[in-house]
Image (spheres, helix red, strand yellow):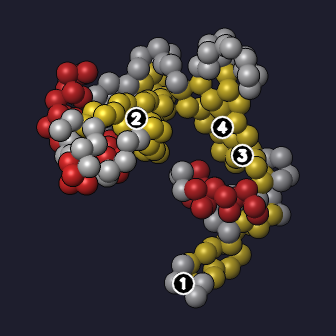
């Protein structure tokens, strides 16, 4: 339960609502911070609390930072300074049923081949190769948190991110027949 204490309109035209949560004042709602916006997440960290992440193995045991155990999923919690957990969720790296693009792997390859556009700069500079794009397939099958983890430049990184962000909904990943969020990495190939 939150109450708006007051609303500020900054010189830049940005509206900021100040919320009271457990006698603490935050410059936004937990949902805004949780949504993946880096600025909102940083503002939450500065004014309201912390974000705890724990890597977990397939037996639901915490994995130490430099352990050689394979990480199964990551638990993420937004915690107020008072210790109250505002939001908790998990992102899986391996799921019992992994997310699937419409039409399976063949459908994904057809989508990439049909929609990839080699940027003019990459053509001019004869840049080709693979751009690795990391993203999350949400519980509803939508794609979010698109990020290039390894690029080749020449506009290809932006094109690969655009292509992934505009994908149609996937069939969501599942654990125990429940939809889960799954992190996925996809190589997007650029050839001249």
Quadrant that contains the C terminus? top left
Disc 2 and disc 3 in contact, CB within 8 angstroms? no
Question: Measured along the vertical axis of the image, is residue 185 above or below residue 20?
Answer: above
Residue on which the image places disc 3: 51
Label 2 vs label 3: CA separation?
26 Å
Task: Tell me which numbered mark, 2 or 3, is placed earlier along the sequence.
Answer: 3
Q: Nearer the viewer, residue 144 or 164?
A: 164
Toward the front, the furthest residue is 125
* Dots 1, 2 in contact, CB < 8 A: no
Secondary structure beneath disc 3? strand
Question: Image point 74% across, 26% down: which residue?
Answer: 65
Residue 176: percent from the left, percent from the top? 50, 16
The 10 Å Cα crowd at callout 1, few under 14, some 14 to 19, many 20 or more, is few
Q: Which mark is residue 76?
A: 4
Q: Is residue 159 visible?
A: no
Give the residue drawn at x 37%, y 31%.
Answer: 186
Above or below residue 65? Residue 144 is below
In the image, farthest residue toward the right: 82
Q: Which residue is mark 1?
A: 12
Picture quadrant of residue 174 = top left
Which residue is labeled 2 in the image?
132
Task: Using the image as rendered, state which of residue 182 and residue 192 is in the foreground.
Answer: 192
CA gap between label 4 and label 1 equals 32 Å
**Residue occupying the far bottom of the picture:** 11
C-alpha span from label 1 to label 2:
36 Å
Residue 91 placement, left or right of 133:
right
Task: Answer with left or right where residue 45 lies relative to residue 118.
Answer: right
């Amino acid at each position: 339960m939150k109450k708006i204490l007051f609303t500020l309109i900054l010189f830049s035209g940005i509206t900021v609502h100040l919320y009271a949560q457990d006698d603490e004042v935050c410059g936004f709602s937990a949902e805004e911070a949780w949504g993946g916006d880096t600025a909102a997440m940083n503002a939450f960290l500065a004014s309201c609390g912390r974000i705890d992440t724990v890597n977990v193995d397939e037996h639901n045991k915490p994995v130490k930072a430099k352990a050689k155990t394979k990480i199964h999923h990551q638990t993420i919690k937004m915690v107020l300074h008072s210790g109250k957990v505002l939001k908790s969720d998990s992102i899986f790296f391996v799921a019992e049923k992994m997310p699937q693009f419409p039409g399976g792997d063949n459908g994904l390859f057809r989508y990439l081949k049909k929609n990839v556009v080699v940027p003019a700069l990459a053509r001019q500079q004869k840049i080709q190769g693979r751009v690795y794009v990391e993203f999350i397939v949400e519980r509803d099958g939508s794609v979010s948190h698109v990020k290039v983890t390894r690029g080749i430049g020449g506009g290809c990184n932006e094109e690969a991110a655009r292509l992934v962000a505009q994908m149609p909904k996937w069939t969501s990943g599942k654990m125990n027949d429940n939809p889960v969020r799954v992190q996925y990495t996809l190589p997007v190939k650029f050839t001249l």
